[in-house]
């Protein structure tokens, strides 16, 4: 028997699902926040690319000028960061991981809009002085902050799962890689797989991805690559790539964590004189950049050239490794996603020495996947990012093999995952000690 619609029942339905209900506001906050994340990611990407291109033009015209610009820029950015936005330092992903483990009141400072705005400005400034940083990690923190502000404006409680969804949407919009956003949320941002969290992640990623797609178009980050190796030939390449990439990526993570937490003469000097230390790190980055001319910023162009089969100096990978590490330990705001992919491409070129008769592009992609996995210890995310940014969907099995070997090999150098280790400094001691 059909229920009769009474005024009382209609009012109850309005209270439960109407425009003023918590359910309606919660959905509006998720959808509206995801749209804003997509727009913010596009604007941030444009500003970062323009800043990087501007510095490269300056460095091309005045080769030695970075010896002054880069160290002074590093020092100034670190001073501003420590004075006005200490929680904006570094990638931004550790901040979101830490915030997801805290209560709503405690997490607000980590994903505050003022911090996020300064994060964007300082990351763009870092690219403007030639720092080896990426915009993907900062986009995660910015996205989480946008989600938090929208929920606050609509008087909706901010759950950790929504913040994780925002961070995933940020990764998806930054790379135009929706599947990578989902896998990154599950592998890195969330400590456990939850059905509700996964649904929110998928929703936020799809919406922010649609915004990015509608404005920027259906682009492939590194361009479509027709990578292919026969299965019998790809197995040894994937194995060697996984071993070398995992060990070298694990070394980067080990050094980055040691610089952040260990107590020795090096770290004591860095903490006692942070601005001077940043200037010295900038001098290292400037020296490498002047010598190489291809390690500035994200090094997107050299990485894409390598993937396309063009020749680059064989020392590009090690040089980018040192440049990214110096930038990372300096205390500048900025991510390591794009620089790590570029470093991985350089190591993939070195891997080509062992397999001179294999397709160059395929070997480069295996090197990128393995090194990136060694750094962040998220093999599924590494495979999906490489697949989506190059269109190499038919090459997923060798990429997965290299990523799994790299994840295993990296543990021999650094057992702790980089982002989770760095997140500990943003947690209270009682929570941090529990791991």
Image (cartoon, rainbow, N blue to C red):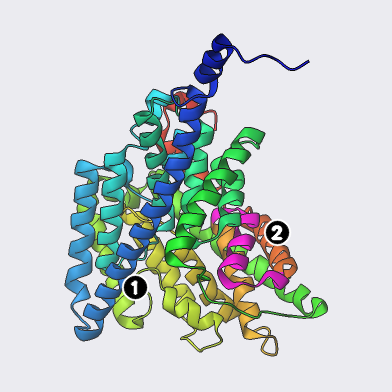
**For the point 74% across and 17% down, which residue is it?**
2
Q: Hey, which residue is sitting farthest right in the picture?
A: 232
The magenta segment: 376-395
- The residue that label 2 is drawn on is 404
Q: Residue at x 65, y 79 (%)?
A: 362
Q: Earlier in the sequence, mark 1 or mark 2?
A: 1
Quarter of the image where one finds residue 407: bottom right
Q: Nearer the viewer, residue 239 or 170?
A: 170
Q: Is residue 29 visible?
A: yes
* Residue 344, image x, y percentages: 54, 70
Q: Is residue 144 above or below residue 309?
A: above
Q: Quick check: 342 above or below 171?
A: below
Of helix, strand and loop, which mostly describes the magenta segment? helix
Q: Secondary structure at mark 1?
A: loop
Task: State the image coordinates of residue 17 (x, y, percent, origin top left).
Answer: 53, 24
The image quarter containing residue 242 is: bottom right
Circles 1 and 2, Cβ within 8 Å, touching? The answer is no
Does residue 152 sit above or below 295 in this rendering?
above
Label 1 vs label 2: CA separation?
A: 30 Å
Count of marks overlaid on the render: 2
Q: Whole-percent x and y of residue 201?
A: 57, 43
Q: Which residue in the protein does label 1 denote?
A: 296
Helix, strand or loop under label 2: helix
Q: Can I make out residue 415 in this image? A: no
Q: Going 64% across and 62% down the picture, which residue do you hit?
A: 383
Image height of 399 relative to 148, above or below? below
Split into 4 quadrants, where in the image is the N terminus?
top right
Horizontally, residue 114 falls left or right of residue 133, namely left
Q: Residues within 10 Å of mark 2 (few under 14, many from 20)?
A: many
């Amino acid at each position: 028997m059909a229920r009769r619609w009474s005024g009382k029942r209609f009012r109850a339905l309005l209270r439960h699902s109407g425009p003023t209900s918590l359910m309606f506001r919660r959905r509006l906050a998720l959808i509206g926040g995801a749209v804003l994340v997509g727009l913010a990611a596009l604007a941030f990407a444009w500003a970062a690319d323009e800043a990087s291109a501007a510095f490269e033009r300056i460095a091309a015209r005045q080769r030695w000028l970075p010896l002054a610009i880069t160290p002074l820029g590093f020092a100034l950015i670190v001073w501003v960061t420590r004075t006005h936005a200490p929680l904006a330092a570094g990638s931004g992903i550790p901040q979101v991981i830490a915030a997801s483990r805290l209560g709503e009141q405690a997490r607000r400072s980590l994903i505050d809009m003022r911090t996020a705005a300064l994060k964007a400005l300082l990351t763009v400034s870092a690219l403007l002085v030639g720092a080896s940083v990426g915009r993907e990690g900062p986009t995660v923190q910015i996205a989480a902050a946008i989600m938090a502000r929208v929920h606050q404006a609509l008087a909706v409680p901010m759950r950790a799962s929504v913040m994780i969804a925002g961070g995933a949407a940020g990764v998806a919009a930054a790379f135009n890689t929706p599947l990578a956003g989902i896998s990154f949320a599950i592998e890195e941002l969330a400590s456990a797989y939850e059905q509700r969290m996964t649904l929110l992640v998928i929703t936020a990623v799809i919406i922010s991805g649609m915004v990015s797609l509608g404005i920027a178009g259906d682009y492939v980050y590194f361009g479509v690559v027709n990578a292919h190796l026969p299965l019998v030939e790809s197995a040894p390449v994937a194995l060697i790539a996984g071993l070398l990439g995992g060990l070298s990526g694990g070394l980067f993570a080990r050094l980055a964590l040691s610089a952040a937490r260990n107590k020795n003469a090096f770290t004591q000097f860095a903490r006692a004189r942070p601005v001077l230390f940043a200037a010295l790190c900038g001098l290292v980055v400037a020296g490498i950049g002047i010598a190489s001319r291809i390690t500035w910023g994200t090094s997107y162009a050299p990485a894409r050239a390598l993937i396309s089969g063009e020749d680059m100096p064989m020392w590009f990978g090690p040089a980018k490794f040192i440049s990214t590490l110096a930038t990372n330990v300096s205390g500048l705001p900025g991510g390591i996603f794009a620089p790590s992919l570029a470093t991985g491409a350089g190591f993939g070129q070195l891997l080509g020495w062992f397999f001179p008769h294999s397709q160059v592009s395929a070997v480069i992609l295996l090197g990128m996947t393995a090194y990136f996995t060694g750094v962040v210890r998220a093999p599924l995310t590494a495979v999906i990012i490489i697949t989506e940014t190059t269109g190499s969907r038919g090459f997923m099995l060798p990429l997965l093999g290299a990523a799994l070997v790299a994840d295993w090999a990296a543990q021999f150098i650094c057992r702790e995952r980089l982002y989770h280790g760095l997140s500990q400094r943003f947690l209270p001691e009682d929570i941090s000690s529990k791991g």
